Image: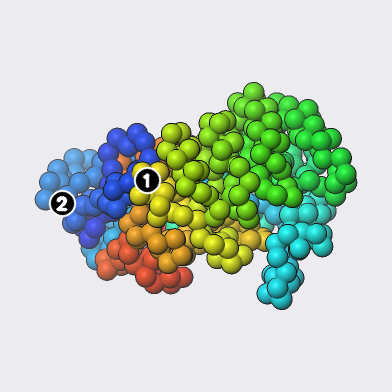
Amino acid sequence: MQKLLIKNISTLYQVRENVQKPLRGEEMNNVPFIENAWLAIEDGVIVDFGSMADFPGIADWKGLEVIDAEDKNIYPCFVDAHTHIVYAGNREKEFEWRLQGMSYQEIAQRGGGILNSAQLLRQTSEEELFEAAKRRIELMIRMGTGAIEIKSGYGLNVESELKMLRVIQRLKKHFSIPIKSTFLGAHAIPLEYRDKRDEYIKLIIQEMLPKIAEEKLAEFIDVFCEQGYFTAEETERILIEGNKYGLKGKIHAEQLSHSGGIQVGVKCNALSVDHLEYATDEDIILLQKSNTIPVILPGAAFFLNLPPAPAKKMIEQELPLAIASDFNPGSSPSGNIAMMISLACVMNQMTPQQAFNAVTVNAAFAMDIQNAGWIDRGMFANFFMTNKSVTPTTFAYHFAHPIIEEVYIQGKKV
């Protein structure tokens, strides 16, 4: 048994016992903490914690490592509930095109965007994809992320979608953090099906889904519900078929226009609807009556210069808002969650406390996990240390600064 005791922690943040549901409304303005704290870990799991004033002492020193964290704060690692980090190459040229005034849709019509990533991925081996994604995850962990959702969607044919999902399975085995896999075959209509889109949807339903289910390659199914991609009706059809194989729904919704994705998500009891830049008051009312979690992706809105999602209004209306990075090669090439906190505060008018809760507790529920995102007994000991001066506001205020000093995954320093 490996045992670790961290004592004299200046402040232990995001301490929550028996969390059963995501945070809503005023709950999102509170990040509970213990000052002058201790934290006990056994075999990678938190077993106890409390104030040093109530520290019970050490009964068994055998195999125990003790760290004195005086002048240090501890936070649970971030949870990133929406990424596309299995990809090939980059799309720097498209970034230049966008700076010259081209829209996302115009770049797609040129053969750029998702279809460009698909072409590159089909030419790349599984081993190359795994090694590149592994490096990205290692970087994300060093920046404080301790749980990640990863989507397919750059394959757009049976062979390449399965290749992506198998890479994600390898990543799950390689890393000791929670990783969830999402099938996003409905990311775009590939060029070879441009004039026969219904045949591609049948390919997803009749060939991809059975093979994914047979190999148990995904937990979730996602659809890009957007003009020029998949309609609300097509999205509903695909989600319903995915549900038959036990895949929980997620939707890329209301990013570039109002496409009806939120409505479909609520109707299909999707776990989350993500992006939401063009969400309306009526959409918010629909979400109030559902269990679907709204997830904003401020990195994508920033990089594409889109209007910010109405996050403040969603929180005021008691929605359990989450934040994710959308780390991908085209619209959000960053997995820096601390930066997403800052963007959400500046662009979406969220408080630092709301944003911190959105990338920890609520993001965990958007990933359908309850073993990461806060400090409690039985949780994975995935946390990071900072200087004692760092508060939840610091992540928003000192945007892009390297605030995190040390990261621990399952109680081991990385």
Secondary element at tag 1: loop
Say which label, 1 or 2, has the lower sequence index. Answer: 2
Task: Compare residues 186 and 363 and report the one nearer the observer.
Answer: 186
Secondary element at tag 2: helix
In the picture provided, is 279 more to the left or to the right than 162? left
Vertical order, 343 against 125 (above or below): below
According to the picture, the residue beneath numbered tag 1 turns out to be 317
Q: Position of residue 103 (x, y in %)?
A: 70, 65
Residue at 43%, 70% (x, y): give it: 399
Q: What crowding class fits label 1: few (fewer than 14 Cα within 10 Å), some (14-19), or many (20 or more)?
A: some
Residue at 71%, 76% (x, y): give it: 100
In the picture provided, is 6 more to the left or to the right than 267? left
**Name of the residue lying farthest toward the bottom:** 100
Q: Position of residue 294 (x, y in %)?
A: 48, 45
In the picture provided, is 37 more to the left or to the right than 116? left
Is residue 121 at least partly visible in the picture? no
Residue type at numbered disc 2: Met
According to the picture, the residue beneath numbered tag 2 turns out to be 52
Residue at 88%, 44% (x, y): give it: 195
